[in-house]
């Protein structure tokens, strides 16, 4: 447990999701529960459809599941696959690996194009693979939060438009923090979760379904499934009903969060995410923690910073938590020790970025790292924000 | 939408789940979100284990999923079945039908013992079936909330103790409102949801797993699965970790609800459910709505009342909602029109029962039903409560 005084150092949740949930959303989560199939709930579900579609960049129905992000990743696959069909997984980090792992668990034959972590999938490589085999689906991660790299979905989607292959995308840590244009980019199923840039507590998963995907989902020869069966979910979506009891309270919160996002304006939300992530990244670089990976593809919802030896990511995370009650992330994968990750999604402000960098400088100094100039991290962020 | 004035007639959620959630629980749901893998969350998950096991009547681990009840029903099956294995489904209502339907969707060969709705499965019939075929699992519903009948789990569990067959039980609308003694009764996996007698919002599913079930779950030849894979969930449960991001806020609420249940005391909670359901049932009978089904097996978490012709359940439900802002349930199955159902679970009191009966009498009268004596429903309930 932390030793930091909660008065001097209030608890700060700064991992790349689940994120700190705004007061307005939390209070909406606390509203009295209503009949999950009554007029009140249908009105909320209808509003959610209307408000969430622009975040997906789609006119397609968006399905709601009580689930984590992993659940809807599985949903995107189990509904379109028959066992033994081929999947092409574009892997450039931990969550791409998970997508491939789920496909294998469901009995798919999975080919992997692995990019160096921190880099993004190369559409040309994808094109070459598509010419060699018949894939039911290409799966990838929009915003690979383990590395901070953003995939060129448009470039890959364009390759699939005139093929039978479906394009399935995990935008769990991207959607609502960065642009997603599902329809324009040719994404067939995009999935996301509530606990990232949608700034809600975890517990809701969403999946948008293109017409092209729907034709496959409706076939009788797909994997066995029940709870995540999109045929059941699609049957009710136009009437604003879910197939099974929906997480009523979490949906109240989501409705509030979506309202806040549209009050600010989508372009403004995206610009704020970019501005703040740029500032935090600049601050980390100034402190001597170089940005990890391909900066041309830098994420706007997470900053991933390299940790120079002999420092370790774990030591920084631990010190930040124990001394400043601030929770940032290391890595639970092959980057373990080598990076730290800080979320820049949801209702965060310049204050959060400066505070992160202030504590980070003190932490690095305490751990024996030679910070170039006192205050250089905060100064670099301020310059970036000017 | 309702026409009732929300000032004169505050919204009352009186269906057999989701139920009205106590203020204390809703405020806990609104607490700031914490790191889903941090010390704070592990402490909560550990406390939840300790507090929830007595409700299952088990020493076995209780797994937590972000899911509706249907999701954990699927989880109980997908983890123990291989496609083509046989399942014996004891069906005495809508949710037993669903259990059978899920098993079929997963590729099981399902034999059904159907009891008349309102009656309960007969252990002798089960014994006869068990002698005729090798079943991987017997599935049934503890509290069939569509009919208000409670299954004799001990009688069936005793038949399975010395067989390889597993006993899977849906206690979604039973647990926390009525006694469940998983270990003593020989239940292998019991599943439940948060939105019934656990008096939380929907969104959490739970499954307890016996040693006998665990041996089957660990086999490599079971159905393909990922999100609901109990091997992954069991791997972390002793460290108070979930396999995937858990619904942090809902778990805060659950912790509060479990605390409230133990403050009142489990025997007291069960006695209150019995006392209030008895009173409501007596009131309905007095109003001319006979109790549905086998009263020796009457539920304590839901009252199911028969609706005499020419009245219909739907008309009563509609009138109660439109005029008294009170949401009760009819039936979404073959009992449609013939019954009404009112929840008697969670933090309800005598006041709720009297109010239900007061509005019900006015509704019945408005619909042309000849109520024996004005006030007879409330009077019967009061007598029952004395």
Image: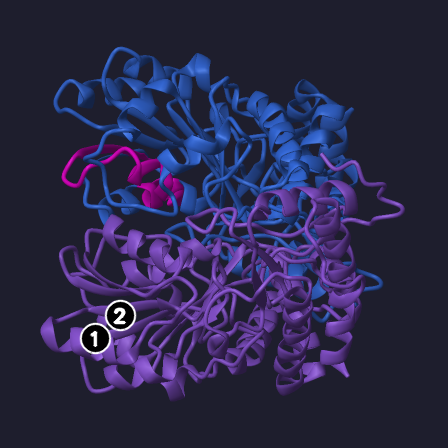
Chain colours: A purple, B blue
Marks 2/1: CA–CA distance: 7 Å
The location of residue A234, given as percent across then percent down, is 37, 69
Disc on the earlier residue, 2 or 1 = 2
Question: Looking at the image, which is closer to me, A362 or A169?
Answer: A362
Question: Looking at the image, which is closer to me, A216 or B316?
Answer: A216
Q: Which residue is mark 1?
A: A165
Q: Seen in the image, is B9 located left or right of residue B338?
A: right
Tell whether position A333 is magenta: no
Q: Which numbered tag is attached to residue A138?
A: 2
Q: Are marks 2 and 1 on the same chain?
A: yes
Q: Which chain is disc 2 placed on?
A: A
Q: Are marks 2 and 1 in contact (CB under 8 Å)?
A: yes
Q: Which residues are magenta?
A: B73-99
Judged from the image, the secondary structure of the residue bearing numbered disc 2 is strand
Q: Seen in the image, is A233 located left or right of residue B271?
A: left
Q: Mark 1: give few (<14), some (14-19) or many (20+) Cα within 10 Å.
A: many
Tell whether position B93 is magenta: yes
Q: What residue is at 76 percent from the left and 36 percent from the top?
A: B349
Question: Looking at the image, which is closer to me, A330 or A156?
Answer: A330
Residue B235: which quarter of the image? top left
């Amino acid at each position: 447990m932390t030793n930091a005084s909660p008065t001097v150092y209030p608890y700060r949740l700064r991992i790349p999701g689940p994120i700190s949930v705004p007061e307005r959303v939390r209070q909406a989560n606390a509203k009295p529960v209503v009949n999950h199939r009554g007029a009140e709930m249908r009105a909320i579900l209808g509003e959610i459809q209307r408000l969430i579609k622009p975040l997906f960049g789609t006119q397609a129905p968006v399905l709601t599941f009580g689930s984590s992000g992993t659940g809807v990743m599985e949903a995107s696959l189990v509904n379109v696959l028959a066992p033994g069909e081929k999947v092409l997984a574009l892997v450039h980090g931990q969550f791409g690996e998970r997508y491939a792992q789920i496909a294998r668990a469901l009995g798919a034959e999975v080919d992997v194009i692995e990019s160096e972590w921190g880099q993004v999938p190369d559409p040309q490589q994808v094109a070459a693979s598509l010419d060699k085999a018949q894939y039911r689906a290409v799966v990838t991660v929009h915003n690979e939060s383990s590395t901070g790299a953003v995939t060129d979905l448009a470039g890959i989607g364009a390759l699939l438009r005139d093929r039978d292959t479906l394009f399935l995308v995990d935008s769990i840590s991207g959607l609502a923090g960065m642009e997603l244009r599902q329809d324009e980019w040719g994404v067939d199923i995009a999935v996301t979760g509530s606990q990232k840039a949608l700034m809600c507590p975890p517990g809701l998963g969403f999946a948008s379904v293109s017409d092209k995907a729907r034709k496959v989902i409706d076939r009788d020869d797909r994997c066995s499934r029940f709870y995540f069966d999109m045929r059941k979910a699609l049957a009710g979506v136009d009437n604003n009903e879910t197939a099974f009891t929906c997480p009523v309270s979490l949906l109240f919160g989501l409705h509030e969060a979506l309202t806040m996002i549209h009050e600010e304006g989508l372009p403004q939300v995206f610009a704020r995410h970019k501005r703040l992530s740029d500032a935090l990244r600049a601050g980390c670089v100034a402190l001597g923690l170089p940005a990890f990976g391909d900066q041309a593809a830098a994420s706007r919802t997470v900053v991933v910073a390299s940790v120079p030896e002999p420092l370790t990511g774990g030591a920084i995370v631990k010190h930040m938590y124990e001394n400043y009650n601030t929770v940032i992330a290391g890595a639970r994968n092959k980057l373990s020790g080598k990076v730290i990750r800080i979320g820049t999604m949801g209702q965060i402000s310049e204050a959060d970025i400066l505070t992160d960098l202030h504590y980070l400088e003190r932490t690095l100094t305490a751990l024996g790292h030679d910070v170039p100039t006192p205050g250089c991290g905060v100064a670099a962020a301020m310059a970036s924000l000017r």
